[in-house]
Image (cartoon, rainbow, N blue to C red):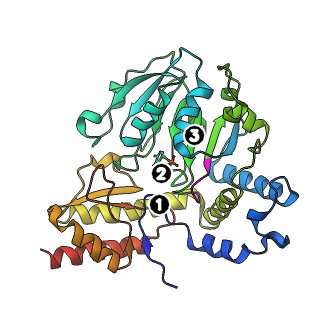
Amino acid sequence: MSRVWNFSAGPAALPLPVLERAQRELLDWNASGASVMEQSHRGKRFIAMAHKVDADLRELMGIPDNYAVLFEQGGATQHFAQIPMNLAREGDSADYIITGHWSEKAANEGAPYVHVNVAATSKAESFLRMPARETWQLDPKAAYVHIATNETIHGVQFKQVPEVGDVPLVADMSSDILSGPVDVSRYGLIYAGAQKNIGPSGLVLIIIRRDLLERPIRPMAKIFRYLEHAANDSMLNTPNTWGWYLAGLTFEWLKDNGGLVAMAERNRQKSELLYATIDGSGGYYRNPIDPPVRSRMNVPFTLHDSALDAAFLQESEAAGLMALKGHKALGGMRASLYNAVPLEAVHALVDFMHDFAHRHG
Ligand code: PMP
């Protein structure tokens, strides 16, 4: 078996012990004589597992009892639309903070269901910094304020929860959930696609303050309504059982490895090592983002001469470093350093970067 160091932005690396356990349990899960994928979500084994997954996540994130946790489908993209459907009435407006590709997409996809007020944007500065909180034009009557805590493509991350008063704060945490402790009580709704720090794609985690489930909203099919999903323990229809199970294995792995405080420290070390290598390369490698808001999860960087990109990608892959190609919107490179990427992988990457710069000086 040969496993590479995987820097994919998502679907991304999963913890090796999670994959190994899933492999061991694949044919005969929980002494049932069948795999977890092959049995009813309404069976006693699955229900017991679902309760444990919920309890483990609540413990890891310190989720208060007045929040519901939902295991949904449709990708974060579907919830860009479903969130305004559930939190806004016809004619309401919501504040969006645009800090990169994903928060912009959230606003665009939400626009058919809520009047989008762009309360702040760093687009004119190519998303290289965050719009200062004092400049945000928030509307106290907004249905909610939407942010993306980490921009997977542009590599900027909120390091503090912005203060937004009594208006519920809604956060797309797809690419930094579980990367460190969060104060859930500061948010009205947190959502995240699973395929970075949780498990496989096809699963979306939603953590929603229960009073928001009761908002009066326009008529809609039950399947779109979070209240119905919460009332049915995320089993209104057949859930993504395989994703739910793997998420549970990841949560157990996190608990066994010191929880979110330990993850935050590991992620700090990993990202600081890579940024120090970029900044110390005398301009050979570049990351132009305002240092205080540089992401600890996704590190985009360019080479001083884009003519070297093809060689960098080919040689890094040959060295066992996978998926360093940057998003097409930015070009260059991107290294994603999610929880499942160990410090050892980042050492291998920076060693390669030093060596490459030396050989292609
Ligand atoms: N939000 C963020 C921050 C993302 O990184 C992504 C995917 N990379 C999405 C939303 C969209 O997720 P999905 O493709 O699962 O809909």
Does 92 lie within the magenta span? no
Q: Residues within 10 Å of mark 1 (few under 14, many from 20)?
A: many
Q: Which mark is residue 190?
A: 3
Q: Nearer the viewer, residue 123 or 181?
A: 123
Beta carbon of the mark 1 residue lies under 8 A of ligand 1: no
Q: Dot 3 lies on which element?
A: strand
Q: Position of residue 216 (x, y in %)?
A: 68, 19
Q: Dot 1 lies on which element?
A: loop
Q: Residue furthest right?
A: 44
User: Is residue 162 visible from the viewing direction of this image?
Assistant: no
Residue behind mark 2: 175
Q: Amino acid at mark 3?
A: Ile
User: Is residue 34 visible from the viewing direction of this image?
Assistant: yes
The boundaries of the magenta stretch are: 198-204
Marks 3 and 2, how far apart at CA: 12 Å
Q: Position of residue 343 (x, y in %)?
A: 43, 71
Residue behind mark 1: 338
Q: Kindly indicate whether the residue at mark 1 contacts the one at mark 2 (C-beta within 8 angstroms).
A: yes
* Direction from residue 202 to residue 136 in the image, left or right: left
Labels 3 and 1: the sequence-earlier one: 3
Q: Amino acid at mark 1?
A: Tyr
Q: Amino acid at mark 2?
A: Ser
Marks 2 and 1, how far apart at CA: 8 Å
